Amino acid sequence: MPEPELARDALLTMYYYLRLTRALEERLGILYRQGKILGGVYLSTGQEAVSVGAASALAPDDVIVPSHRDLGAHLVRGIEPKEVLAQYLGRVGGPSRGRDGNVHFGDVRRNNVAFLSPMADGIPVAAGVALAMKQEGAGRVAMTWFGEGAASRGDFHEGVNLAAVLGVP
């Protein structure tokens, strides 16, 4: 079996975030079923590695534009579990300080652009962020996530085309 390209510590850190994501989402699901969370809870059960692995590959100055099933990316990028719980419960300790819906959160200070919608609108936003970073010449990248439902929307095609035409990172 070939040696893994990542160091053992990096692999253990990713495993930690995989487990943390699953445990936190399980708790959010329980709170939702108890009626303590208004709005939706979108679990990434079985898909945690998509956001955790991708976010783990980024440099600290890179920017993420997560979607509704990317709790793992938020955690990797520094959003604390207590902040996530406060966000879902509409408390002031959440990233939006209790002023926005449960999945609509981010923290620009941590290079985490707030989630807008569960469809493809994060793609043109990420392209715009990447264009700004390209103009700065800082060597940073922007990353976003989306599901297959987003691929049939105009903002998917517009965002991907914009990113390609402008050659943004």
Image: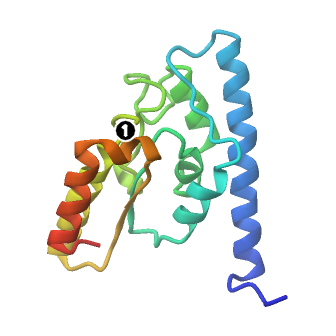
Q: Residue at x 75, y 58 (%)?
A: 16
Total residue callouts = 1
Please, what is the three-letter code of the amino acid marked with disc 1? Answer: Met
Left or right of residue 97: residue 152: left
Residue to which mark 1 is pinned: 119
Q: Where, by quadrant of the figure, is residue 89 drawn?
A: top right
Left-right relation of 18 to 54: right
Could you tell me which quadrant the C terminus lies in?
Answer: bottom left
Front-lying residue, 97 or 14: 14
Q: Residue furthest front?
A: 152
Indicate left or right for 18 with 122 as reference.
right
Residue 152 image-quadrant placement: top left
Residue 161 percent coordinates (x, y) = 20, 62
The residue that appears at 41% across and 43% down in the rendered structure is 106
Q: Position of residue 127 (x, y in %)?
A: 24, 60
Residue 42 percent location from the top left of the image? 57, 31
Instruction: Find residue 73 and report its horizontal and vertical position in percent.
Output: 54, 53
SS at badge 1: loop
User: How would you rate the neighbour count of disc 1 (Cα within 10 Å): few for under 14, some for 14-19, many for 20 or more?
Assistant: many
As drawn, 1 above or below 15: below
